[in-house]
Image (tube, rainbow, N blue to C red):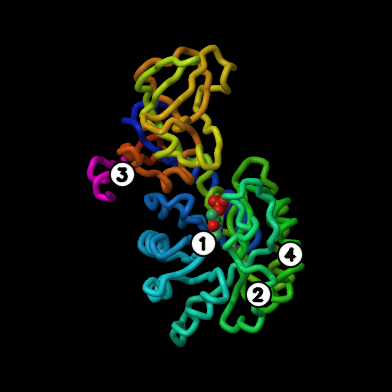
């Protein structure tokens, strides 16, 4: 049976994580580890579906976290692998637990580092790093640009306190978003110009995320040569912590057409919502792809798809189809594993989509199902 037919059998709305696609991405990432000796970590903020952690742990060195909860999830579900954490600020009450479970803790400022360093016990195995802001990025959308004016993320060179580095074993930068190795090459150049003199005394450098490594056309050879050059020049271990590159194109969101109406054009209401189930469609913004569809006006029948919420702007996009849509038709959105499942919400009392895993043999496994209580419990 073909994948599309399998997906259309499932009750909607549901996310379906595609194991085969995940493996394809993981194999590419593993090959980078093998060619460079760098360590690649899953950035859990993009994708935390821990039913796949046993699979991911067969390919990657570990995970990175945005705070205690993600670090705990990694500890519970991928505990034999490395656990790193970066947060713009840690809370006093979280720090002891982070120390217990994290291999690397990265601080966002010298004040956080100075605040917490007295709490590090003797013989502590955790390593500590600082996030730097090289003030260079090539990201157009400010909300995704850690180097935009007055950014709170990372320490700029003018705020770098070179006399406070005792106990610090690495530096971390994260300045990219869905970008290629050419962007990394230009970024690394600035990082070296500004912070290179400190790197000689470090054990590691973390390149952050935003590397589109498993996207077709990515220049893996260039990445490999940059990593190897940095390792050699400064004698550092290199870490890369992609989220997107792990889970890109590794999931679907299946929805059913609930109604078809008209107002200047054909409108279709589906049982999934941009605002609740794929918020990046509104935030990024972007137009997700639907299998067997085309841009508006290309195929004979065009519809504007919207969610069943009261938000006027809960519009997924305009799509054309070969055939007229009917109530009950199933539509399949692609690339819905990353930054979708982790971001969903129950605004408007919208039900959360269930989560399925599509195994490599074509069988589907129900991982999670949600109901009214999941909505009520958070209010
Ligand atoms: C978001 C983020 C990542 C992952 O970014 P992707 O674009 O998903 O690869 C890695 N590190 C940090 C610090 C981040 O904030």
Quadrant showing the N terminus: top left
Comes first in the chain, label 1 or label 4:
1
The residue lying at 53 percent from left, 30 percent from top is 289
**Dot 2 corresponds to which residue?**
160
Comes first in the chain, label 2 or label 1:
1
The residue lying at 41 percent from left, 33 percent from top is 311
| Magenta-colored stretch includes residue 235 | no
| Magenta-colored stretch includes residue 369 | yes
Report the disc number at residue 368: 3
The residue lying at 42 percent from left, 54 percent from top is 53
Q: Which residues are magenta?
A: 366-379
Q: Secondary structure beneath disc 1?
A: loop
Residue 221 percent across, percent down from the top left: 71, 52
Residue 29 percent across, percent down from the top left: 58, 52
C-alpha span from label 2 to label 1? 30 Å
Q: Specify the quadrant of the image occupied by residue 230.
A: bottom right
Report the disc number at residue 229: 4
Crowding around mark 1 (Cα neighbors within 10 Å: few <14, some 14 to 19, many 20+) is many
Comes first in the chain, label 2 or label 4:
2
Seen from the viewer's position, the closer of residues 111 and 68 is 111
C-alpha span from label 1 to label 3? 26 Å
**Mark 3 or 2, closer to the camera:** 2
Q: Are marks 1 and 4 in contact (CB under 8 Å)?
A: no
Q: Secondary structure beneath disc 3?
A: strand
Comes first in the chain, label 3 or label 2:
2
Q: Are marks 1 and 3 in contact (CB under 8 Å)?
A: no
Comes first in the chain, label 1 or label 3:
1
Report the disc number at residue 61: 1
Q: Are marks 4 and 3 in contact (CB under 8 Å)?
A: no
Seen from the viewer's position, the closer of residues 42 and 361 is 42
C-alpha span from label 4 to label 3? 44 Å
């Amino acid at each position: 049976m073909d994948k599309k037919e399998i997906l259309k059998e499932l009750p909607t709305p549901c996310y379906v994580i595609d194991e085969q696609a995940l493996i394809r991405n993981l194999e590419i990432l593993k090959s980078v580890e093998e060619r460079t000796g760098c360590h690649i970590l899953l950035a859990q903020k993009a994708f935390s579906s821990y039913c796949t952690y046993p699979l991911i742990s067969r390919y990657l060195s570990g995970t990175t976290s945005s705070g205690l909860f993600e670090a705990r999830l990694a500890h519970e579900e991928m505990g034999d692998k490395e656990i790193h954490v970066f947060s713009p600020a840690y809370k006093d009450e979280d720090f002891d637990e982070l120390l217990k479970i994290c291999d690397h803790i990265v601080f966002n400022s010298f004040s956080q580092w100075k605040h917490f360093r007295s709490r590090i016990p003797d013989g502590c195995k955790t390593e500590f790093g600082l996030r730097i802001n090289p003030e260079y990025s090539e990201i157009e959308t400010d909300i995704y640009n850690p180097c935009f004016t007055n950014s709170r993320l990372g320490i700029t060179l003018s705020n770098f306190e070179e006399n406070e580095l005792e106990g610090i074993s690495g530096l971390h930068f994260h300045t990219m978003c869905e970008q290629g190795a050419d962007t990394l090459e230009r970024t690394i150049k600035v990082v070296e110009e500004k912070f290179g003199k400190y790197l000689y005394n470090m054990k590691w450098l973390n390149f952050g995320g935003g590397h589109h490594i498993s996207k077709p056309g990515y220049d893996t050879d260039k990445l490999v040569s940059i990593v190897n050059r940095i390792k050699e020049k400064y004698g550092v271990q290199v870490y890369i912590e992609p989220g997107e590159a792990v889970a890109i194109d590794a999931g679907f969101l299946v929805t059913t057409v609930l109604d078809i109406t008209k107002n200047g054009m054909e409108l279709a209401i589906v049982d999934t919502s941009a605002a609740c189930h794929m918020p990046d469609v509104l935030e990024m913004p972007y137009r997700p792809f639907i299998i067997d569809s085309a841009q508006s006006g290309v195929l004979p029948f065009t519809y504007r798809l919207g969610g069943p919420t009261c938000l006027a702007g809960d519009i997924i996009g305009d799509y054309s189809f070969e055939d007229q849509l009917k109530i009950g038709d199933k539509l399949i959105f692609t690339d819905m594993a990353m930054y979708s499942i982790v971001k969903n919400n129950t605004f408007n009392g919208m039900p959360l989509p269930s989560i399925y895993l599509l195994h490599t043999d074509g069988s589907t496994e129900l991982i999670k199902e949600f109901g009214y209580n999941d909505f009520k419990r958070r209010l």
